[in-house]
Image: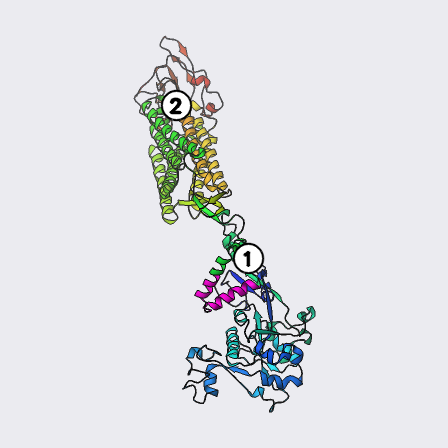
Amino acid sequence: GDCVPFTSQMDGYLACAHYIPQSKTSARWTPEFIANKTLEPTQSCGTMGMEGWYIPLHTAQIYPELRHYSALVGEENRHKLARIFRRPITWVQYCEWVSPHNCSKPDHIASGFPEQRDWWKFHVPGNFQGHFIDTEENNCTKYPSNCTGDFIDFPCGWSSYALPTLYHLNIGLRSYGANGPPKGYWKTQIDEIWRAANATKEHVMMMFLKPDPLYTEFVGTDYAFTRVMLPEPTAECERNRRRHKSRCEEDRTFEERMGDPKGTCDEPPSVLQKIYSTSLRHITVGDHIPPALRSPAYEALTTFTLSDLQIEEMFEAWIEKGRDINFASRETVCDWVIENLDFVKSFIPEGYPREPVPSTTTLRDPIFATALALGLVSVIAVIAATATTYVQRKKSVIEKAQHHFLASLLVGLLLLSIGAVLGAIPPNDAVCISQAYFVNMGYSVELVPLVVKTAALNRVMSAGRKMRRVSIKLSSLLLANAVIGSLVLVMLVVWTVLDPPLQQYDYILGATVVTTMSVNSEHLMVEQVPLCGSESNTWWILSVSWQLFLLLIATILAFQNRHYRQDLVDTRTLAMMIYSHMVFSILRCVSYAFEGSVENASSVRPFRSLIYSVDVLTCIAIYFVPKFLDKSDNRLAERSVHFFRSGSFDIDISGQLQSSGDRSLSNNGVNFSRPSNEIGTGRRIDGEGQGAPADNSDGTRQTTGRTVESPQDISDGSFDAVTEQMDGVPDVED
């Protein structure tokens, strides 16, 4: 991220870390970041921060009065402070200002002239001990009323109020660092100056904060940090202090930057805070992460605390290891954790640690076993239906249903039943991809002919009401099936290339006890259950939506055909099959919606397999079984009705051509023949639609009993007299 300092403008800020384990000044700069949701509210880290003025124990032993501010204030103490606290200089400044030979030769202070990287260092162990000098500011002979000693302060922008305190208490010290108004020194420079003072036995007074490795390093030595007591901190003092931003603005006068004298007091102890970015919660316990996969990091960090003594213990170990910022610091922390493992474990959230285990779900589980068994039954049922259809292919109801239509249905149902079987077995990448192809192609191959046939029947009936001729070709069915099937196949290929349905894992929580040779501990088991899925749900939504679209069209058409007689146009069984498919498709949509809201998404997989299987079996039961069990005579002319209009085609709804010498074109249960005024030898319908008497073979005459004006008579129940078996009407074959 963008490691912009927190004190800069927030616009465009990106967090460069998720967690800051310790901060003293958080209350002053975090509120605006908390308000804009960049940070969460801070929490105590368990450590007390002590910021204040410090002198070495060596100085306090020589000048014990300097431990209290009362020995610092006033003109009477100015000369003493200017004499005691001299200004530190860097290595290059020593060589250029002090060394008689510009460090061309080593001496007791410097080993030689520094490399450029060490120019501005105040102490380099083994090479530059450090050096302190009297400056013009220390010259009380020349400037008796305004000479000052050197005070080592934090840089401008930090939390130090040393300069206003020095000013309002009239203490003869000033900070002459080079880091902006007011002057100050960086933390590394402060550490170097303290070590330089220790090496040269100089006196120094500085602003400092504990806990800190430097503070721990000098504990027990003659340069141990010794606190200088200032006026007691109060709430009034805190309210009247000039905030750090206004103290750093160069366009303000010196008096404005110093603020109100009421803001002069010591720094109160403060509870150091832990700071979290809001993204830490999101990436560890966000709502988008399944509960079983959520990290314990957020909860552990929010509860973890360390005392001052524990911090100092780690500082001591780090110092002993050489204070290396990389290896030594990491090794120190790891060693401390090992030595205090029980303490660290006390912050582990309940339910952790978690141990991933392979799924125990097998085909022996009832739901998976049932889904697989029913899937295999559906495959066998489709194969049996195919064989029976072939055996009874010359049966009247089979021929009327049309062989190519039945073949499309059976192929689609077979593909779908195979997809049901694949949905009931443990998934892998090959199974997931194959199931997507079988299910989607299966529904396409089956539903498209169903829609085409239902639309054709609707078209025939609508045209019959207007006494118009209708021409329906077999190629229309084949073309629609090929085009739509190709589109579905292209969609599947694109799906496979861009975002294939591959094996993923669902994670299920469950508690158990894990026992090892030396430890008996309780772990929360996380079962890894495989399932199929793509990165985006768009593909699943697209496939189901397309099938629902086809079924919606078919449902509307089937509803429009609901009044026509079943024995004429096969409308009722087609409608029942369409309604059945619609119900099961809705159930599939529910399963997809339910999958995203349940904890165990993998449990939906076998139920979806059951939906496929039952859908296939229901389709066979509704459409194929009644045809297989039909006991009617196989003669094609047993029951037929014709509508004749002069100069047009006869429409035989039952599927049988009646006039000899005329060849019929059959599609979707509708046959077309050349016009004829004769129907068999026993009955004639004249050109005006009136039933004329016909001679029977025994010389008698009979009428049809009713005139049929349009196919609407079929729907209102007035077709009974026409459709009765007519004795004396012989079967006519092509």
Query: Callout 2: 10 Å neighbours few (<14), some, many (20+)?
Result: some
Name the colour scheme. Answer: rainbow
Choose top left, top right, bottom left or bottom right for residue 108: bottom left
Q: Nearer the viewer, mark 1 or mark 2?
A: 1
In this view, the residue in front, 115 or 227, is 227
Who comes first in sequence, dot 1 or dot 2?
1
> What percent of the width, then of the height, locates residue 262?
69, 74
Amino acid beneath label 1: Phe
Q: How many marks?
A: 2
* Span shown in magenta: 308-333
Residue 253 appears in the picture as rendered: no
Residue 515 in sight from this viewpoint: yes
Q: Which residue is mark 2?
A: 627
Query: In the rendered image, which residue does mark 1 sit on?
Result: 304
Residue 419, percent from left and from top: 38, 36
Residue 439 against residue 17 in the figure, above or below: above
Of 442 and 180, the residue lying toward us: 180
Counting from the top left corner in percent of width and height, residue 115 is at 41, 80
Q: Amino acid at mark 2?
A: Lys
Residue 535 higher or lower than 320, as above or below: above
SS category of the residue bearing label 1: loop
Give the Cα distance between marks 1 and 2: 74 Å
